[in-house]
Amino acid sequence: MKKIVAVTACPTGIAHTYMAAENLEMAGKELNVAIKVETQGSIGAENQLTENDIREADAVIIAAATKVDKSRFEGKPILEVPVEEAIKNPKDLIERALKMEKPKDYIDKVEKIHEERASQRTGVYKHLMTGVSYMIPFVVAGGISIALSFLWGYKAFQVQGTLPAALMQIGSGAAFALMVPILSGFLAYSIADRPGLVPGMVGGMLAVSTGAGFLGGIISGFLAGYTVYYLKKTIKLPKTMEGLMPVLILPVLSTLIVGLLMIYVVGTPMKTIMTGLTNWLKGMGSTNAVIFGALLGLMMAFDMGGPVNKTVYTFATGLLASNVFMPMAAVMAAGMTPPLGLALATVLFRNRFTQEEREAGKAAWVLGASFITEGAIPFAAADPFRVIPSIMVGSAVTGALLMLFHIELRAPHGGIFVIPIAISNPLLYIVAILIGMVVTALMIGLLKKKIS
């Protein structure tokens, strides 16, 4: 029996990571291929690959949207693809990985071309998502701490020495203060490995101190990563002095270059952009707010946890550091609506779904309530031309309503579990989601045909 080892990882480490692993394992059974999948999720690596697993493997599959260390797979054929590929085409991936056993010239000519093209398509996005994946736990912890401080009243934290003041200090003064440096540092780490961390984090701190915000943090991360990358390629030292590169030359040179660029070149224009964006978002009229909310909703539902969804989520999350909380409310609710709307449709229009889809609808209730948009993927995969427009319209309605109601959300994840403590108006928030759910379900009922 052929043997394959695999690693799956997505930016949030919640849904795509485990869906990809499950699909690869199921495809392995159908193809009679032994496969072990290590998941690198939000709680760390699970089902970890041992040295023996790797030694016995005929090939390696890495399905990831974030950086995965490949050094332990040295000498093995590696097929690296976006995590979505393992969800959609797991059998094809396994078959392609096994074909890599062909002579080395085949691997060089075919698979390396594929990997180069894949890296060109997803490189910048993958680096950004690596930074986001490390940033999200800080934002979640900080957001929940801030939300808990409001249980005693919206101004209770202003009284020094009280528990609300301590919670605000933990959330805003510590966790939120670290989010941009963490984003910048691990974005640089994705490009240049460990040497990128120092200039990346320093650049992120400077983005905060100069007012460049999370957009400045993204720029500093790319600056740091590629600065280190090219310094490593350019500077050649005698072997006796190579030990100075990681501890002295790279961190000092790269930090000075990135720091000076952030202070004298990037900081001021990015501060102007962030200030303008923040003022525009805070001062939006009703019409602009509705249009903006609808756009956020459309993009959240379009690829159900894919690159567009994650880009919008990153944008809303980054705005939390600038005390702009309305887009986050629209984004989370719009991300909850697709699976919830489809779950409702399986109840209202049972004759439009197969037995397997109705069973998937039961899981979609839980996934949607937990803000896991990926719960809509099985339905969209089976009938994309009817399901995707339906969920996009439902999410657009939800996003538009929340921006119209000026509802704020201070925690970037958690679904229904953070509604009581992190939403400025829980009742209207739930109403907006319910309306989006009903719109989604009704469109599904109109567009999908009855199953004979």
Image (tube, rainbow, N blue to C red):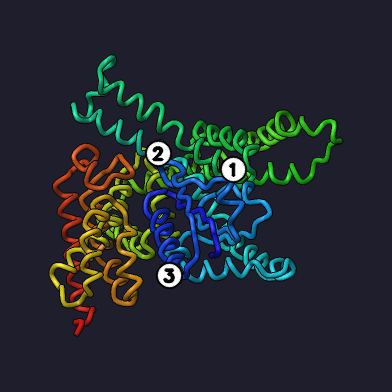
Q: Residue at x 30, y 69 (%)?
A: 379
Judging by the rendered image, the residue that carries numbered circle 2 is 137
User: Mark 1 and mark 2 in contact (Cβ < 8 Å)?
Assistant: no
The kind of residue tagged 3 is: Glu
Residue that numbered label 3 is attached to: 30
Label 3 crowd bin: few (<14), some (14–19), many (20+), radius 10 Å: few
Q: Position of residue 304 (x, y in %)?
A: 36, 61
The residue that disc 1 covers is 188
Which image quarter: residue 352? bottom left
Between label 2 and label 1, give the one nearer the viewer. Answer: 2
Disc 2 to disc 1, C-alpha distance:
18 Å
Kind of residue at badge 2: Pro
Q: Quadrant of residue 349?
A: bottom left
Eye-nearest disc, 3 or 1: 3
Give x and y (percent) for residue 315: 42, 49
From what the image shows, is residue 237 above or below residue 118? above
Res. 308 in view: no
Q: Disc 2 versus disc 3: distance between alpha carbons?
A: 37 Å
For the residues marked 3 and 1, what is the alpha-carbon distance in whole angstroms? 40 Å
189 displayed left or right of 370? right
Number of dots carrying numbers: 3
